[in-house]
Amino acid sequence: MISKRNRTPSQYIGYSLYLYFLGLSLRNVVKALSYLHRVKRSHVSIWKWIQKCHHEGKLSTRKNKISEYIVDETILKVGSEFIWLWVAIEPENRLILAQNITKERNMLVAEKFMSDLIKAHGNHPVSTDGGSTWYPMAWQFLKLKHHTHSPLEKSLIERKMQYIKDRTKECFEDYFPCRKKNCKLNSTMYGNG
C-alpha cells in the first residue's frame, strides 16, 4: 500500500511561523494550528519549517547595524531566591544583543555586563532608565555616551523584557512542572526592575 504524503499549504506554514515569532512555543503553535485551522502537525514539523525558512534567508534580510544599546534590568523570584535579569537590545531591529542573570545589582555588575556587550558588538551610546546610581559610574568607567530612555525606547525595552519573562515562565511550566497532587507552587514569579 502506497501512502501519499499530506503536504501542508503554505498559508498554514506562514501562520505557524508568525505565531512562533510572536512568542509562542512550538507546542503552543501546534495547539493553535490544530484548534484554529484543524491542521494536525507535530512540533518537530514546525521546527523544521523554521530551520528551512532560516537557511533560505527569508527571516531577516536586514543588516544588523547598531546605533545604540538600550539596557534595563528587572528582578525575578525563582523559588525563594531573587535574581536580576539584565537585557540589552538595539532599537532598529529590536534584537536582543545580550542578557545575563546575576544575584546582585551594582556598578560592577553593570560594568561587566556592558564590557561583555562592547566586546561582542562594539562601542555605541547607551540608553537606560536613569533611575539607578550605578549606571553613570559604569558608563564613565567604560567611556560610553549615555542618555535616559525616550518614551519609545522605554516601550521597546519593557516589551522585550515582558517577552523574555513570558517565555521563561512558559518554559518553567512546560519543563519543570510540579509533580505533587493539587500543587499550587508557582515556580517563577516576576517583579518590576
Image (cartoon, grey):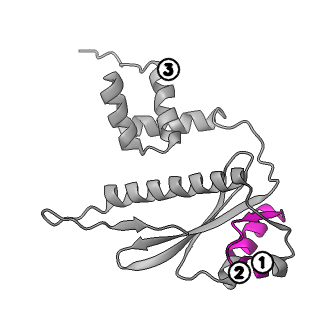
As drawn, the label of residue 136 is 1
Element at label 1: helix
Marks 3/2: CA–CA distance: 52 Å
**Residue 135: where, in percent of width, then height?**
73, 76
Element at label 2: loop
Residue 40 seen from this side: no
Residue 64 sits above or below residue 107 on the image: above
- For the residue carrying disc 3, how many other residues have a C-alpha within 10 Å: few (<14), some (14-19), or many (20+)? few
**Residue 65: where, in percent of width, then height?**
81, 49
**Residue 136: where, in percent of width, then height?**
78, 77
Q: Which comes before the other along the chain, label 3 or label 2? A: 3
| Residue depicted at x 28% and y 15% | 2
Q: Are marks 2 and 1 in contact (CB under 8 Å)?
A: yes
Say which amino acid is labelled 1: Pro
As drawn, the label of residue 10 is 3
| Residue depicted at x 42% and y 45% | 25
Magenta residues, start to end: 112-138
Residue 41 sits above or below residue 104 on the image: above
Residue nearer the viewer, 79 or 193: 193
As drawn, the label of residue 133 is 2
Q: Which comes before the other along the chain, label 1 or label 3? A: 3
Q: Are marks 3 and 2 in contact (CB under 8 Å)?
A: no
